[in-house]
Image: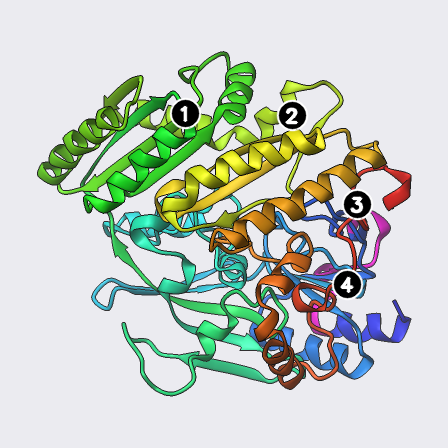
Amino acid sequence: MDKEIVRKIEKIVGKEGYSVKTADTYTYGFDASIFHRSPDMVIQPRTTEQVSEIMKIANSERIPVTPRGAGTGLCGSAVPIKGGIVLDMSRMNKIKDVSVGDMLCTVEAGCVYNDLNATLGKYGLQFPPAPGSAEAAQIGGMVALNASGMKAVKYGATRDFVMGMTFVKADGEIVRCGTGTLKDSSGYQLARLLVGSEGTLGVITEVTLKMAARPKAAASVLAAFRTPEDAGRFVTALVAKPLVPSACELMDRVSIEAVNIALNDPLPNSQALCMVEVDGEPETVDKELAIVEELAKEAGASDVQATKDPAISKKWAAARGSVMVALSSMKPGYVSVSLADDMILPVSKIPDAVTAYQRIAVKYGVVVATYGHAADGNLHTKMLLDPLSADEWVRGEKAVNEIFGVTLELGGSVTGEHGVGIAKAPNFQKERATALSTIREIKKAMDPNNILNPGKMEQWEGSILTNLRYPCREYM
C-alpha cells in the first residue's frame, strides 16, 4: 500500500486502527468459505464518519474495499478477491437504542447477534433470524447477506426486520434511509435494497431493526424415517395442516451417519430425520406438539420422540448443527467444504431434491451430506473432498453445477440465506439471467468506479476453483 495513503488512513483511525502487517492481512484474506486472498490493508473504523473519510480516499485512488463482519460467511463474500482494503466493522459494535414501546432497536454494524439477543431478552424480546454462527455473526454482515437460520420458517429472514439503515456510498456520502416506525411507504426502499447486496453497493454502519416477542414455551419432536420421501411427506403435511413450526430441520442418511460417528451416536440410525420445534403460549405448544407427533406417525415414521425439556431440544439442535464439522470425521485426510450449499426449493420438492443430490454424488464419486430447514425449503449440502486432489475438486465442481441445475429445474433458487459471493456466482448468473443487466446498472450507478467488493456475484467470471485456501497447486 502506498505510504502516502497509509499516512492519510492513520490520520483518520489512528495507529491502532489499521494494519499492513503480513500476519494481519493474511488472516483477513479468509472467511469461512473455501477461498483466500490477502488484502493490502486492514482498517477498523469506529464511526460512520471515519468510514466516510476512508471511502473518499479509496474512491479517489480506485482502491477496492471489502466490508467485513465476523467472517462467518460460507460463499467468499468477505474475501478481498481484488486485494485493496478490508474494512473490519467489529469495533462498531454498540447497541445504541432499545425502544420497547416502539418494538425497535438500533445497533451498529459490528454488534454480535447473540449479544443483541442477550440484551433484548431482558425485555422479553428477540431478533429471531437465528443464523448458525449466532455466537459470532455481526448484524451488518447478516443484513448484507440477508442471513437467517432455523427460525426463519416462522419468524422470517433478516430483511423482514430491517426498518432503517445508515450506510456509506462508494464516494463517502453518508445515507440515512428508512424510518423509526414499524412500516414505511415513502418511496424507494433503499434500506431493503442494501439487504443482500453483500457490500457491493455501500458500507452498512448502523441498522434499525424491528423486534419480536420471545415465546413463553417450546417443545420438540425428533422423527426418524425409512426414506427421504417419507420425511418429505411429513414436512408437506405439516405445512399443509397448516401448522407453522418455529423450526423444522431435515437430515439425510449421510448427515446422520457423520454426526453419529463424530458424536457417539446421539441420533437414531435412519435414512432421514426431521427435528421439529413448536413455540408460543404453553397451551398452544401442547396442542401443536400432539399434532406434530401424529403427523409424523401418519407419514410412516419409524421412531418418534417428543420433549419439552430444553436440554434435550438443545442436544438435538447441537447434533444437527454439527454436520459440517462431523462430516470431516468420516474419512481421514478429507475435509468438509461448502461448494453447493444453501439451495432453497418449493417445500413439496424437497424429497425430489434430496434423492437427486445423492444420485449426482454417486455419479461423480463424491460424498454429499444434505440437511437443512425443510419447512421453508432451504437445504444445505456439504461435500467431502481430498483438498490436495485436483481431480476431486474438478469432480466436485461438476457435481455442484448439476446440483444447482436440478435445484433450478425444480423451481428453486441457488441461495436461501448464505448469499452469493464467489461460490454461487456462476449459477446465480444463470438463475437471474434476465435481471443481470438491471443489477449491473444499479451497481454502476451507486459505485461507478467499482471499488465496493468488486468481482463478486454478477461480476464473477469463470470457474469457482480459484484462490482456494487449500494447498492444491493447480488452483492456488
Q: Eyeballing the image, is 373 above or below 109?
A: above
Marks 3 and 2, the one that precedes in the sequence: 2
Which residue is depicted at the point 53% across and 49% down?
407
Q: Main secondary structure of the magenta part?
A: helix
Q: Eyeballing the image, is 4 above or below 288?
A: below
Marks 1 and 3, the one that precedes in the sequence: 1
**Residues in magenta, as a range:** 12-24
Which mark is in front, 1 or 4? 1
Which mark is in front, 1 or 3? 1
Q: Amino acid at mark 2?
A: Ser
- x, y percent for residue 77: 65, 57
Say which residue label 3 marks. 468
Say which residue label 2 marks. 328
Label 4 Cα neighbours within 10 Å, binned few <14 / some 14-19 / many ≥20: few
Marks 1 and 2, the one that precedes in the sequence: 1
Q: Would residue 60 appear left or right of 133 to someone viewing this image?
A: right
Q: Amino acid at mark 3?
A: Leu
- x, y percent for residue 29: 76, 51
> Label 4 near label 3: C-beta < 8 Å?
no
Is residue 97 at least partly visible in the picture?
Answer: no
Q: CA distance from mark 1 to mark 4?
A: 39 Å
Residue placed most toward the observer, 313 or 416: 416
Residue placed most toward the observer, 292 or 173: 292
SS for dot 2: helix
Q: CA distance from mark 3 to mark 4?
A: 15 Å
